[in-house]
Amino acid sequence: MQMTYSFLLAAILAYSRSRKFFYAYYVFKILTSMFCEGSVHCLSLAYVADNVPEGRRASAFGILSGIGSSAFVCGTLSTRFLSTASTFQVATAMAMLSAVYMRVFLPDSIVNDNLSTPILSEGKLDGIVNQDEESDKKIQMFKTLPSIEDMLALLKSSLTFSQAAIVSFFSTLSDVGLHASLLYYLKARFHFNKDQFADLMVITGIAGTVSQLLLMPILAPVLGEAKLLSIGLFFNCAHMIVYSIAWSFWVPYAAALFSLLYVFSQPCIRSIVSKQVGPCEQGKAQGFISGIGSFANVASPLLFSPLTALFLSERAPFNFPGFSIMCVGFASMIAFVQSLMIRAFPPISSERVSNLH
C-alpha cells in the first residue's frame, strides 16, 4: 500500500508543479503519512528478520541500510544532472518499478491462511473461497491488529527491548535535530550554499554505504550488536560536537567522514530488537521502534530549531553559533550511555510476548 501511495505522490508532481497540484500533493502526503509513514522501512526489516538466522541479522540489516544509503547517493547525484521535471518523472518510474517488483517477486515470509498469496507463488489455491468465508477471514485479520495495550506489553516484555527503544528515541532525536539545524548553521558560519551542503550529503552517503556493505558484515560477528551499537553512537556524538566547534570550512567535510562508523547504530538497534521477539511479532516490534522514531521526528525540530535560530541571531545569550549542534550531540550522548547498559540477553519467544498481554 505504501509503495502504491509513494508512486501516486511522485506522479502528482511529475504531472505538474503548479500551485493546485502542489497543494494536492501536500494534502495527500499528510493523509498517507498519518497511516503509512515509515511502513516500507519497518516491514522490509521485519521481512529480513523472518528470512535471516539470528546470527546473521546484524550483517543483513547493515547491508540493507547500505543499499538504502547507496540509493540515497544515487538520488542526490541524479538531481545535479536532471531537470526538475525529469527528477519527478524518474522518481515516479522508480517507485512504480519497486512496487511491481515487490508484488511479483517477494512472497510472504510467514505463510498464513488469512493472507493473500503473491502473484508468483509456488502453490496455487484449489478452488474459490465463497463470500462468507472471505468475510470471516477479514474479521479474523482485523482482530489481530495490534493495539496500544499490545505495544505496552511488548515494551515491558524485555529489559533489552525497552533499553533499545530509549536508545532509538534519543538517537533519532539527535539525528533529526542535526539535519534540521546543520544547513542554517553552515550557511551562517561558513556561507555554505545548497550545492556544498549536497556535497556533504554525498560524502556522508558514500562513506556510510562503504561501511555498511563492507565493514559491518566483518565487525558484527566479531564484536556483536551491543558493542557495535555503542561504537556507532560514540562516533555519532563525536561528529556532532566537531560540527559545533568547526573553526574552518573544511572541518564539516572531515566530520562527514565520521559516517564510516556512526552508521552502525540504526542496523544494530534493529537487530537487537528483532532478537527479542518471535517470528510473528517482527513487524509489530519494528513498527514500534519506527513509531518511537516518528515521535522523535516531531519533537526534535520543536526543541532544536528555535535554539538554532536564537544562537545564530544577534540576540544570542553568548557567542557560540554551534551551541544548538552541541546540544544535539548531548542528546546523542544520552543514547550512547544507555547503549552501554544493554546486555545481549537470550531472545524471547512469541508466546512470551502474547502471554504478557
Image (spheres, rainbow, N blue to C red):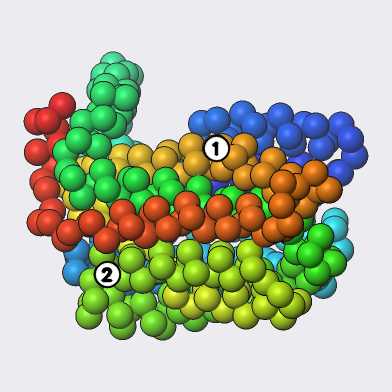
Q: Please tell me whether mark 2 sits on a helix, a strand or a loop.
A: helix
Q: Residue at x 56, y 43 (%)?
A: 300
Residue with the mark numbered 2: 227
Could you tell me residue 109's position as x and y percent? 28, 52
Q: Secondary structure at mark 1?
A: helix
Amino acid on which the number 1 mark rests in the picture: Ala
Residue at position x 74%, y 36% in the image: 25
Residue 40 visible, this angle: no
Q: Measured from the top left, where is residue 133 in percent x and y?
A: 26, 21
Whether residue 169 is visible here, answered yes or no, is yes
Q: Relative to residue 291, is residue 301 drawn left or right?
A: right
Q: Please provide percent x and percent y for residue 39.
A: 46, 43
Circle number at residue 128 = none
State the count of labels: 2
153 and 47: which is toward the camera: 153
In the rendered structure, which amino acid carries the disc numbered 2?
A: Lys
Q: Does residue 163 appear left or right of residue 350 in this picture?
A: right
Badge 1: how crowded within 10 Å, few (<14), some, or many (20+)? Answer: some
Q: From the viewer's perspective, is residue 277 above or below residue 339?
A: above
- Asked if the residue under mark 1 is in contact with the one under mark 2, i.e. CB atoms within 8 Å, the reply is no
Front-most of residues 308 and 318: 318
Residue lying at the far right in this picture: please name it.
18
Along the viewing direction, whichever of 188 and 90 lies nearer the viewer: 188
Whole-number angstrom distance, CA of label 2 to CA of label 1: 28 Å
Q: Quick one: label 2 or label 1, which is nearer the N terminus? A: 2
**Position of 233 compared to 34: left or right?**
left
Q: Residues within 10 Å of mark 2 (few under 14, many from 20)?
A: many
Quick check: 300 above or below 48?
above
Q: Which residue is mark 1?
A: 299
